[in-house]
Amino acid sequence: MTRQTGAALGMKRVSAFAFGLVAMTLAAVPAMARDQLHIVGSSTVYPFSTTVAEALAKQGALKSPVVEATGTGGGFKLFCEGVGEATPDLAGASRKIKDGEIQTCAQNGVTKITEIPIGHDGIVIANAKPGPDFAVTRAQLFLALAKNVPQNGQLVPNPYHAWNEIDSSLPAERIEVLGPPPTSGTRDAFVELVMDKGCEGFPEIAALAGDAKKAACQQVREDGAYIDAGENDNLIVQKLQANPAAFGIFGYSFLEQNADTLKAAKVEGVAPSYEAIAGKQYPVARDLFIYVKDAHRNIVPGIDAFVRELVSERAMGTEGYLADKGLVPFTPDERKQVEAATLGSLGLTALAGAGSGEPQGALGAAIHTVAGSTGATVTAVLIAVVGLSLIGFFMGRARAVAKAGGQLRKLHSLPNYHGFYVALWCGLPALLVALVWLMAQPTIVTEAAKAAMPPERVASLDENQLSLLLSEVRQAAAHADLSQVGDAAVRAGAEAYRTWDSMSHLGALGAAVALALIGIGFAYSRINVGARSRNRVERIVLGVLFACSSLAILTTIGIVLSLVFESLRFFAKIPVTDFLFGLQWSPQMAMRADQVGSSGAFGAIPVIAGTLLITAIALIVAVPTGLMIAVYLSDYATSKVRSIFKPLVEILAGIPTVVYGFFAALTIGPAFRQIGEAVGLSVASESALAAGLIMGVMIIPFVSSLSDDVMNAVPQSLRDGSFALGATKSETIKQVVFPAALPGIVGAVLLATSRAIGETMIVVMAAGLAANLTANPLQAVTTVTVQIVTLLVGDQEFDSPKTLAAFALGLLLFIVTLCLNVVALSVVRRYREKYD
Amino acid sequence: MTDAVLSGASSSSDAKLRRPDLSETRIRRRYAAERRFRLYGVLAIGFAVFMLGFLAVTVVAQGYSAFWQTRIALDVAIDPAKVDPQNTRLPESLAQGDYQAVARDALRGLFPDISSRADRRALGEFLSNAAGDGVKKMVLANPALVGTTQRVEVLAADDLDMLAKGRINRDIAEADRPIKDQQIAWFDKLKQDGRIVSTFNVDFFTSGDSREAEQAGVGGALMGSFLTILTALILSLPISVAAAIYLEEFAPKNRITDIIEININNLAAVPSIVFGLLGLAVLLGFFGLPRGAPLVGGMVLSLMTLPTIIIATRAALKAVPPSIREAAYGVGASKQQVVMHHVLPLAMPGVMTGAIIGTARAMGESAAVLMIGMVAFIVDVPKSITDPATVLPVQIFLWADAPERAFVERTSAGIMVMLVFLVLMNAAAVVIRRRFERRW
């Protein structure tokens, strides 16, 4: 009874504590000063922005920039989130910024953006060297890849299966094209440059108007001839090498690097080359851009230096280092125009020649670190509090022993408990205060800095301008020599910021130490022979245990909240019933306002079916294998064999899934395809079987290790009893050990199942993106996780249904697994009652 | 009784009743089944180990060469005019010198008959753009070298490295090769002169990412992984063990406990990418923690490993026999003392198993950290848990997407480094487990 109330008390305290935490963190925490450039955006621009960043870092001009590959849309979402250190400074894009994105930017205070075109990116259609030579027109490509093609005056579903059915000059090969998914900017460009142009010559399409015409031109076929191959161009390259009959669509730089194994098709009679792309004779090429947030030029060092380096001859020029990395450069005149326009709009001078460059001193000048950084203070507080707690522990212990006067059994609690009691009173309040400080400190210091600036300067600013000004203040306080800061207000603010910052660091340390000492004093005074220290300590421990287990609930709430809002926005555009019961999944929606995609069907059934199919295959592989491994290791193997093989098998779970993905996509997939061809079966190179098999291998340890542990835990007496009746070892295992261990085994299998359902990278690489509703393991299917990744890292706008669908899928997955688990848990419980 | 007497009376029916041959058949069959069963076990282990070995061989065959780096031994004349622009021999001045030019001149000096601009450029492509760094380091360490000629092994560019390692096929058409015939001739001459040397690639382990394959290393990613996993373990191990203890030993059987329990089982099934979304929305969006920092990565991964360790810990706690508890109660221990002093220590091997699987999963995780901005190009090695960083699997993922051929071996080498760490972790766990594991 007393223990119960103790637990209840503990819970009350914990929940009060949790409420306090939440309340405190509601005040937004401003970011810390940043001295590195932060660049986000398209993975196509990534190789070039990183190269410039590295060149800049090598000059020693500034700390090396951080470049993140987020996809164009994801990049703009971050870029347009606002101004200040927490948001990126530059965004790379494989398309022009859209009006909607400019508006979002403007709403968040990002009003001035400078656009810098950096060069061309050629898109090639290529196949392996042993395959046929290929020269196509865009009209032929359109006929090969469109969903509906004109025939005898009307549009019919694409009937072509081999290239020579379209035109006898083309090779007699099956149409099989590996290309980027609908979420990719490369796909977008391909549709615009090839499909839109290719459909123009057909009278049937010319007769259509508006959206119907666009739809006819832009829809890509979904019957397996065009294979969405994900964003990894290297993977496409390697799949082509494994399958000479197939063609791939990818960036020019990959062709250049793989010229020994691949050859490009001529489009409209022109083969892709630097000259042909730069001279615009090769028709399938687009421009790449980098966008600069002008407002950040004052708060983050290095933006000007980056831009100047980027547009310089040695980077962007025809002989520049970006060309070495696969960028098709502008002609010298074009580059000069870009340079003049960019530098003019930013008010910069050009980089002089190829020397070591402009005065970099001002930039790299003595980066002044603020006296006590947050990290150092936290460490100091921790060391102080832990040290004091230790001292408190020994003091409390000593006092209890002294009080007992050598007769320890007179004490209500063991001396150690008295020690713990003092230590807890010393440590907990002090750490709590430190935590509060950690969260409140930036706000307080920033407010102080704001107050120190002339009020008339601050009052006239709106929220975004204010945040920008404060960012400037923080940056000045962190880095610059204050006497060199021109703006008097910023200088005043920065001085106040520094003063308050160092004061608050000392204050936090002082407060924590004082509280710790008070805690020691209080608890110390309460120690005597009859003090119920053990009960008090146990109550606190129980509270902590409860808090830890309720973290799971907090996590779930967090997950649900972070999924629900975006999902609701998705369901506002697409009806829930269409999503849940639709039999077609094809997120081919328009990527830009002036485009019309196809139907844009968002029926989740094929995606879920695909997930289940692959999971089932994985389990068929993993469960018997894993169980037999567990049986062998727990009941047959000598302890030596066991100690070698158990960890060896466990390594399978630790191999990065990227590795499995490559293995499945490049070794197992093509092997199955060849075997299939040999026995006359049609096997897709992204078959569910290959992905499922490899996934099964990956989850073997989840079954084996945990089952082994529970089987090992079955009492030896049960086995001995069975042996005594004359049973063989296998009979004992099958009829005694196995049933007794069943609840644990079911748990292990469930864990493995969940791992298989949630696995992402293997299926991203090996299972493909085609959403076929089929139970045939030899066909390609897609899974929920693949779709989430593809939708989220694509180049489309962040508010489009395509992106939002990812959250709906995530929510769906979450709910489905929840239901599964509720059912499974009740089943496990029933079993457990039997054998406990 | 009567039956026995009766059967004893007739000797012919006695033999019939014993049926010795039949039971022998049955025993043989049972033993055969036994052997088969055992064989299945061996086969299962064989399959798992075969897959592991196959993967390992594939990876090693592709990646081992990345641990050696091709360098060109040059007699570099350290020209004061180039390396010491202010002519003071002070470190500040020496640091600004153009060492790349010095290295380039040394290479050109070996081929005096090359005069056209295009040829000189083609020759220049042999050198990595970090070739001068080695010279710079030497000179800064010993300024007296200025004005002398030193033999320096400078870093070769990735294409030359690939050629030296035999990964560029000389037999295919010249236009399809990144290295042209003329360059191959130069290379062969350098090789004849013994100027092409292959050294152990220390930089691979110490340097951060680079767009130049020959300079790219896993140092930054390793440090990032270490900081991330450390954060994750520090957070998740105590929390999940505490949660497991509460749920298994103390929780009253009521609705709240049920909800928590279902929750935890469910969290184990949530795809890692959803945890990434959670981190994006809550840790970055709401709490404003720094993007791409190991702190955030560690927090996300700790949430992800939480259910794994909790489930394993609970299974291990459950497996401790009641006799232990009863004995402890018998000598007057409180419930917490029973759990903390007796049950938990006995359950530790199981806890370790869970922790290993959880950590292994966290270490190989890329989807979750992709969402919180750890997929970034970072040259500097991170120094604290708030610096932007990337982790090993993401580094592998990024390299796998790079067009340059030389990144293929880097990718495999990165995987090898990762596997080595995994094996080390597992070995440590085996030692722990072997010391404590027992069967009741």
Image (spheres, coloured by chain):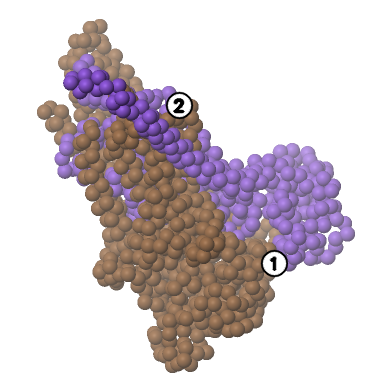
Chain colours: A brown, B purple
Q: Residue furthest left?
A: A1
Please give the chain letter of the residue carrying mark 1: A
Percent position of residue A28, x then y: 32, 52
Percent position of residue A63, x then y: 56, 51
Between residue A15 and residue A545, name the one nearer to us. Answer: A545
Task: Reply above or below: A171 against B11.
Answer: below
Which numbered disc flags the more N-terminal residue, 1 or 2?
A: 1
**Distance between the Cα atoms at labels 1 and 2?**
65 Å
**What residue is at 48 percent from the left and 30 percent from the top?**
A641
Label 1 belongs to which residue? A319
Task: Reply above or below: A234 against A546.
Answer: below
Q: Neighbour class for label 2 at 10 Å: few (<14), some, many (≥20)?
A: few
**What residue is at 43 percent from the left and 90 percent from the top?**
A154
Please give the chain letter of the residue carrying mark 2: A
At label 1, the amino acid type is: Glu
Q: Residue furthest right?
A: B113
- Looking at the image, can residue B82 be seen? no
Label 2 belongs to which residue? A639
- Secondary element under disc 2, as helix, strand or loop, is helix
Q: Quadrant of residue A305?
A: bottom right
Number of numbered tags placed on the structure image: 2
